[in-house]
Amino acid sequence: MKRKYSLALCFSLVALTACSDDDDKIVIEETPNIEYAQVRVIHASSDAPMVNVTANGAALLQDVDYAVSSGLIEVEAATYAVTVDAKLADGTTLTVLEADLPAGADMEYTAVALGNVSDENLMLKVVANEKADITSGNARVQVLHAAPDVGLVDVYVTAPMADISVMEPTLSANYMDNSGQLEVPTDDYQIRITPNGDKTVVFDSGTVNLATGTDYFISAIPNEWSGDSPVALLVALPDAQVLLNDVSSGSDIRVVHAVADAPAVDVFLDGSMTAAIEMLSFGELAGYLNITEGMHTVTVAANADNSVEVISDAEVDLMLGSSYSVLAVGSLAGTDSGMDISPWAYAEHTRRIATEARLNVIHASYSAGNVDVYLTPTADISASDPALTDVPFKAASGSLSVTPGDYTVSVTVTGTKTVAIGPLPVTLAANGLYSVAAVDAKDDNSMFTVILMDDFVAEEE
């Protein structure tokens, strides 16, 4: 469904005015002939936070995240002063882009925010096209190279499984280049990208269908998901979007040993007799492994004797392009209380943002009950409100946006100020990823402890 936004003052539809005392004359003002253009905004800057977009000082879009397209918005034909404001972790905004956009009648504009905040090369790329019908039986495709760290590439749009070694590329593009609008017959296609003059495929879409009468604006953007491909494809439609990851991206998975009373373990995938991870002790985590997406089974066995399985063939369902942490949680002694050892998988957000730190707080302590989590400048939480409230066992905050700086993390039983875990002093840097898992302690000297992950671990190395 099209959306209309009038960014100018409302116009008068019909005005009736009496021109004499006896009202014998009526003047009817004609309705102005308003002309329209269509505008779409795409967030393609991989290290930028969410943004708000204004036009002539009026809110046009809010909370636009990376790899998101607004869809086509109908506006009155005029010249607009477009401003892009980055949303900072402290709730304020910072203007990062300003540009004048002359929106002509019967034109379609796609404005793409691309480049990197950290490299100070953020800019707005505008692609303009005249509105035109698509020929019957065809789809229309336009391609933009929006990955700043990728050079000149060749793009092949072919029948599925066609041999590109004997073919010329459909088009070649360098960063910020865009193709014209290309009409192709409705059918199944395969999109492959190679370095210029080289047949080595660095991105493969697999089979995709291009539907009759559909307009596709396809941006090659930096890959912030799993897999080795340098790009993913953001397919912007008039009213929707689709993200295409490389078909070989698989899923990234890491395992964390969070069971205090369990021995060192080996981890086996899909019934294999060869361990995917060996000798993982309490408090340790294995680096990410890339495996195919879909359903898998995880078995965790004692390293000293693999016949002793603490988790047997637990199923995990993994999505293409996604990253996951799998924590072994519970207790060897917890069978009677229902806290026996089990796997807990949750999705990770691994994109780094130049203007903020990202903090994930994980409740993996089976004996702690529901907790409140404090993130404060000092260890004194007496006058502070919790950042997270009433967090249950096996829950994660997700990536919290945090202003870079020094903090103290404290965990209390919900509704109290008695610190059960912490206080833990932490330094959170811009562009950083940080995870803290609250777990039961291994010894009798304390009830709880923490497992530090991501950049905390990198700092220790």
Image (tube, rainbow, N blue to C red):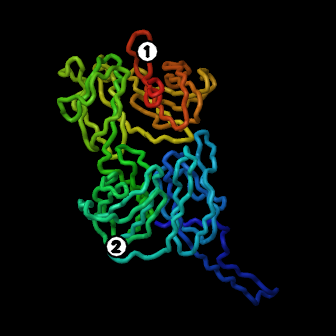
Check disc 1 and report the residue beneath it: 447
Q: Is residue 428 visible?
A: yes
Count the marks. Answer: 2
Q: Residue at x 52, y 66 (%)?
A: 109
Circle 2 SS class: strand
Please identify the residue farthest to the right as the structure is shown.
Answer: 21
Q: Nearer the viewer, mark 1 or mark 2?
A: 2
Asked if 175 appears above or below 80 in the picture, the reply is above
Identify which amino acid the numbered label 1 is placed on.
Met
Residue 83 on image: x %, y %: 62, 56
Residue 346 on image: x %, y %: 37, 36
Residue 437 on image: x %, y %: 43, 26
Q: Residue at x 39, y 57 (%)?
A: 153
**Neighbours of disc 1 within 10 Å: few (<14), some (14-19), many (20+):** some
Residue 311 on image: x %, y %: 25, 27
> Rounded to the nearest whole Å, what is the CA distance between mark 1 and mark 2?
66 Å
Question: Between disc 1 and disc 2, whose residue precedes?
Answer: 2
Please identify the residue farthest to the top as the structure is shown.
Answer: 445
Asked if 368 appears above or below 105 in the picture, the reply is above
- Which quarter of the picture shows residue 23? bottom right
Q: Is residue 366 left or right of residue 114?
A: left
Please identify the residue farthest to the bottom as the structure is shown.
Answer: 24
Q: Residue at x 69, y 82 (%)?
A: 29
**Neighbours of disc 2 within 10 Å: few (<14), some (14-19), many (20+):** some
Q: In front here: 77 or 381?
A: 77
The reply to whether dot 1 and dot 2 touch (C-beta < 8 Å) is no
Q: Residue at x 82, y 86 (%)?
A: 21
Identify which amino acid the numbered label 2 is placed on.
Asn
Check disc 2 and report the residue beneath it: 138
